[in-house]
Image: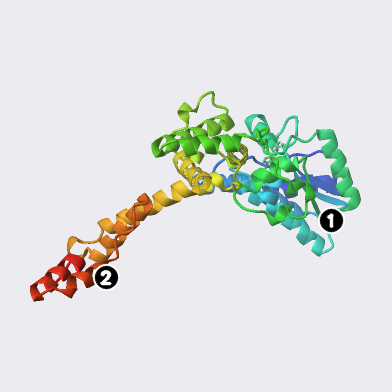
Amino acid sequence: MTVAACDVADRAALAGLLDGLTGQGDPVRAVVHAAGAAQATPLTAMTADELRDVLRAKVDGAAHLDALLPDGLDAFVMFSSIAGVWGSAGQAGYAAANAYLDGLVTRRRARGAAGTAVAWGPWAGAGMAQGEQRDQLARRGLPALDPDLATTALRGALDRDDTTVVVADVAWDRFAASFTARRPSPLLAGIPEAAADRVDTPAADPDAPRALRDRLAAAGPAERDRMLLDQVRVAAATVLGHGTPAAIRAGRGFLDLGFDSLTAVELRNRLTAETGLTLPTTLIFDHPTPAALAEHLGRELLPDAGGVTAEIDRLERLLDAVPGERRDADVTRRLEELLARWRGDAPPAEAPVAVADDLADAGEDDIFAIIQREFGKS
Ligand SMILES: NC(=O)c1ccc[n+]([C@@H]2O[C@H](COP(=O)([O-])OP(=O)(O)OC[C@H]3O[C@@H](n4cnc5c(N)ncnc54)[C@H](OP(=O)(O)O)[C@@H]3O)[C@@H](O)[C@H]2O)c1
């Protein structure tokens, strides 16, 4: 085996290297393309220059190898990445570069040439996935792959003559929960281990939801709102690992507070256990601040109190919008009747009977007075 180095994105340099090897009577029988440049930049901040640099080694290098080497190779191995298979935060260019490698070997296979792309999960030891990034991936259900296991898997892929294959150590329960936090994933549909959703659900106290409902029902509206907000702030602080909820401000967005798709699921699970409600994994995306989420929980936990109050608020706004000259006596009467019923007042006496009695011996002026009294108009 010969190990030779050059800038693989430089076609002339690579051609010179390959010609040199062939000239020494050592034609290339197999190639492993493992060059690459890492990336950790949000898509919105990525510049064209950065994208070019990230694509350079992987895409240009692979394309040159494909063009310069004969089709009859024993192996044409591309080191690809899970970033190109299911995406990875901050790695838009890197993901695209790896997806190119997967596409390239598929195209080679179509013309009868060798080609295997291994989309690796994070490796342990030296390499691209290190430090905070490795910890973050492990928290999302992608613990670092043992290098011995990885090379065994590589041998297996070559023995099986795989075209594209993912080799990753995946903790499916954690991975699936965070991967599907914003939307379901057909990609995982065929993986039974990924169907479970069990991320760090705190041991549920079966009495907690009822106790919470009772406390809320006994509280006044302002106290109830405060209790619900506290519930959300404390749960959010616990999930983010804060000692106190002081930093969890009511109006601040969960994403600005540091939530991601994994911690979103953890918060959902914690609040599910505390409230007894069935809450979606999209909870913090649907209700993006602690205040909005607390309001939502209040509506779900005490639908009567919250629902009626919300409708009265709506009616109040509607009535305020009616100009004075268009305020209808019929509306006033119905509101008064409603209030009387709500208070449990006795129903009013039957008006027609009283009118009939009065009319029996009334003169013309009396009749107009009665109409004025009973119907508010003459
Ligand atoms: N480690 C992981 O967890 C992991 C996971 C998934 C996929 N992979 C893939 O596996 C491969 C190896 O990863 P790694 O962890 O060993 O990465 P690494 O430590 O960053 O090594 C990448 C290597 O590519 C070389 N390189 C960059 N541009 C080049 C170019 N234009 N021509 C020739 N060489 C160039 C770098 O050389 P210089 O140092 O001289 O720049 C470096 O030696 C990469 O393709 C990576 O995408 C790795």
Residue 285 drawn at (x, y percent): 53, 47
**Res. 372 image quadrant:** bottom left
Say whether residue 154 is left or right of residue 289: right
- The one nearer the camera, 250 or 90, is 250
CA separation, marks 1 and 2?
97 Å
Give the residue at x 72% y 51%: 62
Q: Which residue is mark 1?
A: 114
Say whether residue 371 is left or right of residue 263: left
Residue reaching furthest top? 243
The label on residue 122 is none
**Res. 364 image quadrant:** bottom left
- The one nearer the camera, 181 or 136, is 181
Q: Which residue is mark 2?
A: 352
Residue 91 drawn at (x, y percent): 61, 44
Give the residue at x 87% y 39%: 152
Q: Is residue 316 above or below residue 257?
A: below
- The one nearer the camera, 38 or 197, is 197
Give the residue at x 74% y 57%: 104
Residue reaching furthest right? 159
| The CB of the residue at mark 2 lies under 8 Å from ligand 1 | no
Say whether residue 169 is left or right of residue 260: right
Q: Amino acid at mark 2?
A: Pro
* Residue 258 in view: no
- The one nearer the camera, 60 or 237, is 237
